[in-house]
Image (cartoon, helix red, strand yellow):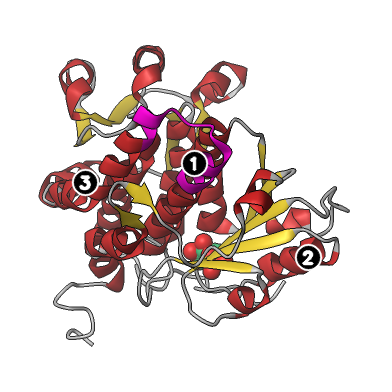
Amino acid sequence: AAAEKGGYEHFMLKEIHEQPRAIREATAARIQGGQVVLRDLNMTDQQIRDINKIFIVACGSSYHVGMVGKYNLERMLRRSVEVCLASEFRYSDPIVGKGDLVIVISQSGETLDTMAALREAKRRGAHILSIVNVVGSSIARESHTVLYTWAGPEIAVATTKAYSTQMAVLNLLGLYFSQVMGTLDHEVYSAMVRGIEKLPEQMERILEQAEHIHDIAKRCAGREDVFFIGRNLDYALSLEGSLKLKEISYIHSEAYASGELKHGTISLIEDGTLVIALGTYTPLFDKAMSNVVEVQARGAQVLALTTESHAGEMGKRVPMLMTIPDTEEMLLPQLGVVPLQLLSYYIALERGCDIDKPRNLAKSVTVE
Ligand code: G6P
């Protein structure tokens, strides 16, 4: 069993460390000479240009990838994107049909609710494009178009490399569509492509901070309530950070859009409450800073995540800080998720939890 884990104590840690390679597998062959090339995308340019509505449908962490995808696809395509929980979509008499694109995201390709949502959308005439990890899985087989994530087998129940590669593939899809639709500034497109090419090496640099993050985890492991806050892409990322933490450490954790603090959550902040403040999204860094100050004024202890270029400023205010290298705005969650995965892992380790097989959870939920 130790050999299977490649010398790591848990599959989750092994899979966290496999991410640079997984991202390379998912992206390298799909970028040629600075252009996104999707050979497995069996859609004509006309079909792409004619897309009516865009939906993203998934469960769990795959749904959180969809949340990031909404921000990025809307920005790249200037089209509105609706993100739906598969378990809700399937029973909602969805307003979807011919000409609409339904992007289904699933690591296993077997999640029952996701499959049911797919069938519902397909029955109504939508084009089903799935982003799947397991080759030949049911969802892959029933889709019109499949883009594989090529992350390799994921064993730990808590997803890490599948989440990262789903996001990478969705970004590539957005870039590809943007080219066909002519909606993204050429400079931004090229910078995104270069940014994606740099991700594996930048992820390696984050992984080198594992010991620092372990130290922070030791200081956080005794908590019973944690709040994640963030705006825009940091909000989307906070949903995944919070889920990761609660699923493996059993700490009660919630994610809030920072702007909603005043509408309720702030009443839960008392002396010593741990707030994990995500401040990676550069355009709103100042807002992130003021929310940090705001919760600190109510006694919160803050752990912040930000980029290297903002680390100095954030570091002056917070006692605990994790940083990621600077990258293109739309790629920040690709890097930001890595320290959050390590944080959850080390907190769960300190708490003596069964990290690879958390109680009551399954890798793939094939029942309702
Ligand atoms: C389970 C797993 C999660 C996963 C979700 C959706 O709850 O524990 O990690 O995000 O199912 O799974 P899928 O295979 O459809 O991505």
The label number, if any, that marks residue 122 in the structure image: 2
Q: Nearer the viewer, residue 38 or 275?
A: 38
Answer left or right for 187 relative to 48: left
Other-residue count near label 1 (Cα within 10 Å), few / some / many at <14 / 14–19 / ≥20: some
**Image coords of residue 85 (percent x, y):** 67, 52
User: Which residue appears at 33% of the width and 22% of the height?
Assistant: 282
Label 3 sits on residue: 198
Residue 273 appearing in the image: no
Confirm whether the magenta stretch covers residue 3: no
Which tag, 2 or 1, sits closer to the chain's start?
A: 2
In this picture, residue 119 sits left or right of residue 105: right
Horizontal and vertical percent position of residue 53: 73, 43
- Rounded to the nearest whole Å, what is the CA distance between mark 2 and mark 1? 26 Å
- At 46% from the left and 44% from the top, the residue drawn is 175
Q: Is residue 226 left or right of residue 48?
A: left
**Amino acid carrying mark 1 in the image:** Gln
Image quadrant assignment for residue 294:
top left
Counting residues from the start of the chain, the first of labels 3 and 2 encountered is: 2
Q: Residue at x 18, y 29 (%)?
A: 308
Q: Quadrant of the N terminus?
A: bottom left
- Mark 1 and mark 3: span between their CA atoms? 21 Å
Q: Residue at x 56, y 57 (%)?
A: 60
Tell me, for residue 179, which label it has, or none. Answer: 1
